C-alpha cells in the first residue's frame, strides 16, 4: 500500500491528539500489507487486506505503542513477489523504520471526521505558548 503519510492518535487524558507522520524527505513509501481473495462455500467472493505493524521507533514511542511496517524501497520487489515463500528472509523486513528519517507533528481534530478530506488535515497545530 503506497502512502505519503499516516495518522496516529496519542491518548491525552480523556481525549486523543492526532499526529501526522511522514518521511522527512516527503517521498511516498510503502506499507507492508497482506491481501487475500477467497470464495467461501456460499460463493460470495471476499477480498481483504491488512497493514502489518511492528514495535514503535523513537518518533512513534511517545505517540503509540506500535507503528505500521514501512518497507525499505530496496525490499519492494521481494515483498511483492508471490512466489517467494521463505518466511525467514521476510522476517527482517518487519522492523521499525529508522526514526531519523521520519517526522511527526500534531494536527487538529479536523482530521477525525472522514468528510474532511482536504489539506487542513495536514496543517500543523500551533506550538503551545
Image (tube, rainbow, N blue to C red):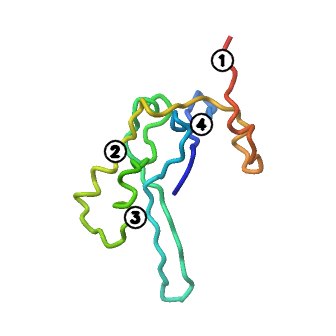
**Along the polypeptide, which appears first: circle 2 or circle 3?**
3
**Along the polypeptide, which appears first: circle 1 or circle 2?**
2
Please give the label number shown on residue 127: 1
Kindly report the distance in space between the C-alpha atoms of the residues bearing marks 4 and 1.
15 Å
**Along the polypeptide, which appears first: circle 4 or circle 1?**
4
Kindly report the distance in space between the C-alpha atoms of the residues bearing marks 3 and 1.
41 Å
Quadrant including the C terminus: top right
Q: Residue at x 45, y 43 (%)?
A: 67
Q: Residue at x 66, y 15 (%)?
A: 128
**Along the polypeptide, which appears first: circle 4 or circle 2?**
4
Please give the label number shown on residue 83: none
Question: Could you tell me which secondary element the residue under label 1 belongs to?
Answer: loop
Frontmost of labels 3 and 4 is 3
**Along the polypeptide, which appears first: circle 3 or circle 4?**
4
Q: Which residue is mark 3?
A: 80
- Using the rendered view, name the quadrant where residue 101 is placed: top left
Considering only vertical position in the picture, is 72 above or below 105?
Answer: below
Q: Which residue is mark 2?
A: 95
Q: Which residue is mark 4?
A: 20
Question: Could you tell me which secondary element the residue under label 4 belongs to?
Answer: strand
Kindly report the distance in space between the C-alpha atoms of the residues bearing marks 2 and 3.
17 Å
Q: Residue at x 68, y 37 (%)?
A: 122
Q: Position of residue 116 (x, y in %)?
A: 76, 46
Question: Could you tell me which secondary element the residue under label 2 belongs to?
Answer: loop
Amino acid at each position: 500500500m503506497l502512502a505519503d503519510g499516516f495518522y496516529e492518535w496519542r491518548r491525552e487524558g480523556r481525549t486523543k491528539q492526532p499526529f501526522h507522520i511522514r518521511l522527512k524527505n516527503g517521498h511516498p513509501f510503502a506499507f507492508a500489507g497482506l491481501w487475500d481473495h477467497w470464495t467461501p462455500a456460499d460463493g460470495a467472493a471476499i477480498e481483504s487486506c491488512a497493514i502489518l505493524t511492528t514495535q514503535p521507533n523513537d518518533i512513534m514511542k511517545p505517540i503509540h505503542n506500535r507503528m505500521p511496517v514501512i518497507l525499505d524501497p530496496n525490499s519492494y520487489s521481494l515483498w511483492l513477489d508471490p512466489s517467494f515463500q521463505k518466511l525467514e528472509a521476510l522476517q527482517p523486513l518487519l522492523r521499525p523504520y529508522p526514526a531519523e528519517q521520519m517526522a511527526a507533528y500534531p494536527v487538529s481534530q479536523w482530521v477525525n471526521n472522514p468528510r474532511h478530506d482536504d489539506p487542513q488535515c495536514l496543517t500543523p497545530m500551533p506550538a503551545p505558548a
